[in-house]
Image: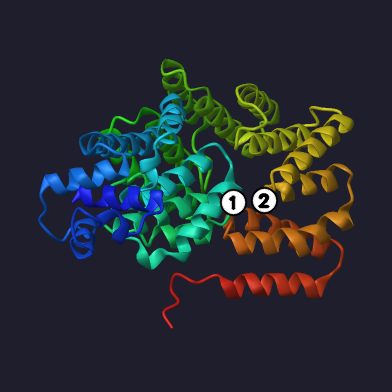
Amino acid sequence: MIEGKLIKFYREESGLTQGLLAQGICSVTHLSKIERGITEFSHEITDLLAKKLGITMNIERSRYFFLQKKLFKWNNALIMIDSKEIYQLKEEIETESLRFLADFKNQYYLILARYYLFVNEKPKAKKIIETMRNQYSDLDSDEQNFLNHVDGIYMFLTGNFKSCIETLKKIDNNYSNLEYYYHLAIAYHSIQSTIFSYFYGQKALQFFKSTLNILRIIDTETLLLVQLNSKEPYDMDETKQQYEKLLKVCESVNCIDRASKIYHNLAFEYYRRKRYSEAKQSYEKALELITEKTPHYLTSLNGYISACYKGRLLPEEELIDLSKKGLKLTKQNQDPRQMDFEIQLHTIYQNEKELYEYIEKTAIPILIANGDQFVKQHYEKKLFLYYVKSNQKEKAFQLASDKMTSEKSYYHFE
């Protein structure tokens, strides 16, 4: 019963007790039942109650349904990544006091948290998520699913990939926004689980195609292309052709942000093949298309520094300045990628002892906590070779032993 919910909302907004509002109109018991939607009532009574509250019921009913539609459109705009619609609807919804009505309050805050993640204001999103977590048992199943989805996105953006997967896997089959398959796919990619990443990527692609979500189709096609190169480098000519096709799609829909990510991925494929000059050019294109506030700016900057250092394509002083710039930005934004630029500086300065102490005592524990297997394995190998080179045999043996113990054999059934 919408009328009862509206009456309760405005009564509480006005600071009236049920007794004061019901006086001269109906019994307190009857008003209580109207507010809870468990009794039949005459429109004459609800009109009298509304008049006493200074509202017109027909107008409020229209506002209710209008807000309901706007919240749906706002959430859909975030899924479709329609920036203009996202900002416009947020502005409109925040002028509507009914967003705090019991029917809308949780949904509004969850969409708002999703919005804060969209604009890279993670602390604000975290505050909402923590509040909603504290009342998790009071949420309905749709709200619980939505919260797990938003929380999973937050965990991914803060580098907690294992927690991201665990949280997203709590979502049940009744959740209608299958976009979360994409977030599962990128989380699995981040822990080097290629098969699961490809599996969920395919499911996400089906959903995005069914909803004509062009930007997300680009994202998912890009992710699937990355999976082809995840274990062993795929044919570079064909890889380049596939990326160029995606760049043309980006151009056709004027999607600069996606084009930057595609150039970044192409640069990485050149980098892992030791084609540093071509990697540098692609990283430059990726960086030219975005600003320092773009979430993946630091990732591309780090890749650019690595390519230029490995290929000796920039003076050492310039590489140091770029690394310090990246480090400053990570500290300002409390970004977990601070580790990347600390390592860059130690590497460029050729502080070998300090570099490997940092990798051992800081970098690897962070990567273990976040579940970032791919990068962890990379640094474990570097650390092992350093131990061997510096004749630290016990540490080398311990690292190798830990690695062998932690990895499961395909044929191990005990």
Q: Position of residue 150 (x, y in %)?
A: 45, 50
Q: Earlier in the sequence, mark 2 or mark 1?
A: 1
Secondary structure at numbered mark 1: loop
Residue situated in front as seen by the camera: 202 or 50:
50
Would you say 297 lies left or right of 150 here? Answer: right
* Disc 2 target residue: 336
In the displayed structure, would residue 169 be above or below residue 198? below
Q: Position of residue 139 (x, y in %)?
A: 35, 61
Picture residue at 70% right of the left edge, 32% below the top: 304
Residue situated in front as seen by the camera: 328 or 53:
53
Would you say 215 lies left or right of 174 here? Answer: right
Q: Position of residue 92 (x, y in %)?
A: 41, 30
Residue 263 quadrant:
top right
- Tell me the amino acid under the disc marked 2: Pro
Would you say 314 lies left or right of 238 here? Answer: right
Picture residue at 40% right of the left edge, 40% below the top: 97
Could you tell me how far apart the alpha carbons at marks 2 and 1 are, in whole angstroms?
7 Å
Residue 221, numbered label: none
In the displayed structure, would residue 3 be above or below residue 238? below
Q: Are marks 2 and 1 in contact (CB under 8 Å)?
A: yes
Would you say 315 lies left or right of 94 here? Answer: right
* Disc 1 target residue: 158
Q: Quadrant of the C terminus?
A: bottom left
Residue 219 quadrant:
top left
